[in-house]
Amino acid sequence: MGIFYVIGTPIGNLDDITIRQLDTLKSVDFICAEDTRVTLKLLNRYEIKKSLVSFHEHSSRADAQRIIDRILNGENCGIVTDAGMPCISDPGEVLVKMCAENNIEVKVVPGASAVVSAVAVSGLDTRRFMFEGFLPVNKKERSERLELLKDETGLMVFYEAPHKLKNTLSCLADFFGEERKISLCRELTKIHEEVLRMTLGEAVEYYNSTEPRGEFVLVLEGKTRSTDDKITLEQALEQVKRLVEMGEKPTDACKAVAKESGFRKGELYSAFCND
């Protein structure tokens, strides 16, 4: 019986490869890759010639079983993803589960991680954090996911593509409040690496005038308001009513109170309209 190696790879800069990663890639009988074209660039850079097997989110159970059968027959297999550690929010997790079911030994060859790297440079309190990956595209599912996170006190880490960033930032600002701190880590380890530290409100404003480019890791501050300081929804609505009575538009009043109270602007507006 062979061994299944989970092999980390660079997240952008190919010089971040490790000696052990290179040795393992050279020693295995074949390599499973999310995108063989991407992996081939890495292998060519270090003059490694190995058989590549494509395994991605659209691969079938039968595809996975063929890989497992090869390992059961004595071949050693390595798995890589396009960037970073495979098998985390990644198709490779299926193979790890199947290896466990078949008592196949799984060894990890660790490497760069966009999640840990982003948390490390976020400038926020890094004692606790949770990885959320990509938020659901479906609006209802996204709201349900964020609802579960509303009282989270640790950092929350999200992945996001450039064409979805504006919508995601607006959603986060509406849900968590515009004053919540966020670090936007773009193109980590690459030529155009950039880390922007600001509030959600500032991030929305910035990217309304700046077109997002590259892949993003978003590190969002957790809930920090103490229970003793938190005002009730009724108290927040009273503040909204006072501002409206003074001539503010309801939407502007809700936005202003949301910044101070911790309630979402949409939540306050809905409650105000139904009051």
Image (cartoon, helix red, strand yellow):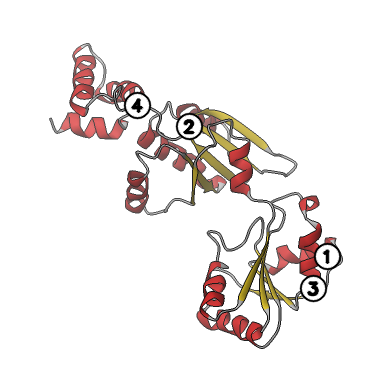
| Residue 137 visible somewhere in the drawing | yes
Instruction: Quote the CA–CA distance across marks 3 and 2.
Output: 48 Å
C-alpha span from label 4 to label 1: 54 Å
In the rendered view of the protein, which quadrant contains the N terminus?
bottom right
Q: Residue at label 3?
A: 27
Label 2 or label 4, whichever comes before in sequence order: 2
Horizontal placement of 21 versus 174: left or right? right
Above or below for 122 versus 83: above
Q: What residue type is labelled 3?
A: Ser
Residue type at mark 1 is: Asn
Q: Do the residues labelled 4 and 3 touch (CB within 8 Å)?
A: no
Q: Give the alpha-carbon distance from disc 1 to disc 3, as whole Å.
A: 16 Å
Q: Residues within 10 Å of mark 3 (few under 14, many from 20)?
A: some
Q: How far apart are marks 1 and 2 (CA)?
A: 41 Å
Mark seen at residue 44: 1
Q: Determine the secondary structure under disc 2.
A: helix
**Number of the front mark, 2 or 4:** 4
Q: Which of marks 4 and 1 is in front?
A: 4
